[in-house]
Image (tube, grey):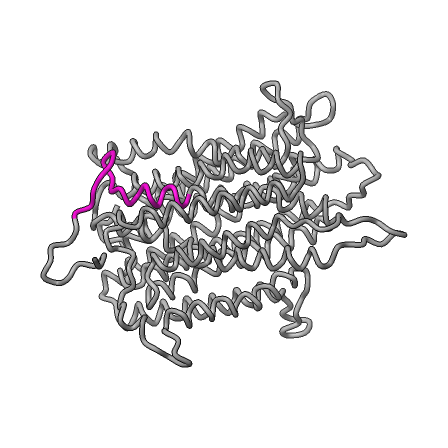
Amino acid sequence: MSSTPSPASAPPVAQEFLGHPKGLYICFFTEMWERFSFYGMKALLLLYLVKYHLFSDDNGYNLIGAYGGLVYAMPVIGGLVADRWLGMRKAVVFGGILLVLGHLGMAFEGRQAAMVDGVIVRDEGALQVFYFSLALIIMGVGFLKPNISTIVGKLYGPNDARRDSGFSIFYAGINIGATVSALLCGWLGETWGWGWGFGAAGIGMIAGLANFLYGQKHLMGHAEPPDPARLRERLFAGLSREHCIYLAAIAGLAVVWLLIQSHSLLVAVIPGVFETSPVLLAMHLVTVCLFGGILWFMFRHCSTVERDQMFAVLAFIGFCLVFFTLYEQTYGSWVLFSDRAMNHAALGIEWSASQLTSLGAFFILVLAPFFAWLWPRLEKRGLNPGKSAKSAWGLILAGVSFLVLVWSARHPQANGLTGIWWFVLAYFVLEVGEMLLSPIGLSAVTELSVPRVVGLMMGGWFLGTSYSEVLAAQIGKLASMEVSGDVAINVADALSRYSEVFLFSAKIGIGAGIVVLLLTPLVNRLMHGVR
């Protein structure tokens, strides 16, 4: 039986659980396991590079910036392909398969790098497997990430007051996976071996793919290809359009594989004037094509109201870019700060730096039920501050979280290290800010975008995040240190460096939040009544 109703049949009625469509919970668990694998790997990545492969701080930041940039730029293509041809369900399944292969490939460590006669000797074969595994993950996220979020949005009708609440629940799924993975994969990676941590992340992705395949019936046909007949058309060599899409994506892995290896190279596009990395150059090209196409669509195919609402979506993408430039430092400068300059004992346990990355997701879990309850209640009383104002306060709180770290760095304990509870407080403040901005922004993209390009606009949201990854890495590099395995770190110098970087980041967050507050009346007008 086809999952898409015929014109003469009534549309399927969505079954509900706890006041939301059951499809929400299928997406919840799929995203939970996908984020388990993604953040389990990410919690270990920078430490793995600088401790196992002996990358310098700068090159480690360059690689995580290049990886983060590509992993969030690729959803532009994945969203476009799903919108035009593949449909969201098929895109999520294909992306899930690539992610399983990539995360399992990360479990291959090879030989640890060593200093020989003053030269670092690395296992180049293992590094190539590592780079190709990252390429598989990048391509897999590109197909899965924008489309699973878009499916959630399609489960709710226009102006459904449950939408923001539903995205808050969906966001909790992301953070259950992130919490458990950072604790488990971080412990396995730093205790038993890096491959154990990365391998556990791969097992999580298998569970996520199995959940999605099992629960497809609850998506109520919202995720099917827009034109199944066109997808089956034969293009060449007897291959259907669908198979050609898959083959093109597999061929694209070679390009991504080469790009990720160029993380610390510079290309002189205009010698002496414009020099950039191949990854950034690729991202700039994608950005020009994407936003050029979006603007063309807005002025050629949209009514005045639709155009205004699409401009509002672009504004939310801008808010997201600034926020995640701050947030993504939790996997960069925050990791090395906690590893090098902080006491790790709390509650009778010695916490590793990778395990502490679970704090962010843990606080989201604590906060998500409260915010899921709060927004509908405020809406009923006419007190809901609206999406733009929420985003503004999210940015301000992100800046305040860095002020907490500045205080901790400037007031170390008797042994010269900072206290772990200041770090916990900084995470809490940051995550309150995230709950005010990120799920609300995702909701805005699905609600304000013109329906036939919502997947593409979700790709634009993640493209904003891709620049955040690169910018976060560049900010982190301001505190880079030359670290030798046989020389103790100068903790006082480290605290001074991190204090300066954190203060700079605080100014960005608070300043941007104030600007967004001032722009809120304009953004509200562009939204034309959408709250």
Quarter-of-image position of residue 208: top left
- On the image, the x and y values in percent for residue 320 come to 44, 50
Name the one closer to the observer, 326 or 277: 277
Quarter-of-image position of residue 436: top left
State the residue lying farthest toward the top: 348
From what the image shows, is residue 15 above or below residue 251?
above
- On the image, the x and y values in percent for residue 525 come to 26, 53
Residue at image coords 51%, 39%: 399
Name the one closer to the observer, 73 or 215: 215
The answer to whether residue 126 is seen in the rendering is yes
Quarter-of-image position of residue 301: bottom left
**Does the magenta portion include 15?**
yes
Residue at image coords 36%, 67%: 294
From what the image shows, is residue 348 above or below residue 138?
above
**Does the magenta portion include 455?**
no
Name the one closer to the observer, 1 or 386: 1
Name the one closer to the observer, 338 or 87: 87
Residue at image coords 67%, 45%: 48
- On the image, the x and y values in percent for residue 275 come to 64, 68
State the residue lying farthest toward the left: 8
Q: Quadrant of the C terminus?
A: top left
State the residue lying farthest toward the right: 117
Q: Quadrant of the N terminus?
A: bottom left
Give the residues in magenta. 13-31
